[in-house]
Image: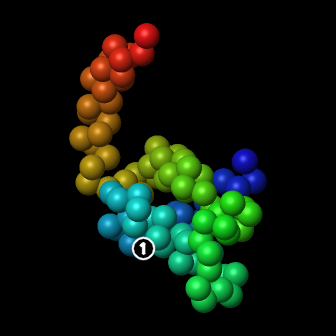
Amino acid sequence: MIQKLKKRWPLVMDILLSKPKTRDKDILLYKEVYKYEIKALGLKNPDFFKLMEQGKVSNFETIGRIRRLLNQKCPDTRGASYKPRKKAEKKVRKEITKLTP
């Protein structure tokens, strides 16, 4: 798993820095990563989920995990929603804790 993170870290960092809208919407970030990976594989009309199952393209969790790590370490990768989310974090944690049996 660490290898997958190391492999895609530079790509995700580049996308976050060059395309500011991806900082607040993970789905846009996923789209950009997959556009790069599918182009690198030389595919035109891929069976996307089959590629994901085969491990040929990154999975959603890996991309999201990299974004969260980059947000912690590199303020330039943060979008406008970062501060409000961090501010609400303690309250949300308490609410989640109340939900668990």
Say if 15 sits above or below 4 in the image. Answer: below
Residue 65 in the image: state x and y as whole percent: 54, 47
Q: Residue at x 52, y 63 (%)?
A: 13
Residue 5 in the image: state x and y as whole percent: 66, 53
Say if 44 sits above or below 33 in the image. Answer: below
Outermost top residue: 101
Disc 1 packing (10 Å; few <14; some 14–19; many ≥20): few
In front: 48, or 71? 48
Residue 18 in the image: state x and y as whole percent: 42, 73
Figure colour scheme: rainbow
Residue 93 in the image: state x and y as whole percent: 36, 23
Residue linked to disc 1: 18
- Horizontal side, residue 6 vs residue 28: left or right: right
- Horizontal side, residue 91 vs residue 37: left or right: left
Q: Residue at x 45, y 65 (%)?
A: 29
> Image quarter for residue 23?
bottom left
Type of residue at label 1?
Answer: Ser
In front: 82, or 56? 56
Q: Residue at x 54, y 70 (%)?
A: 33
Which quadrant is home to the C terminus?
Answer: top left
Q: Residue at x 40, y 67 (%)?
A: 28
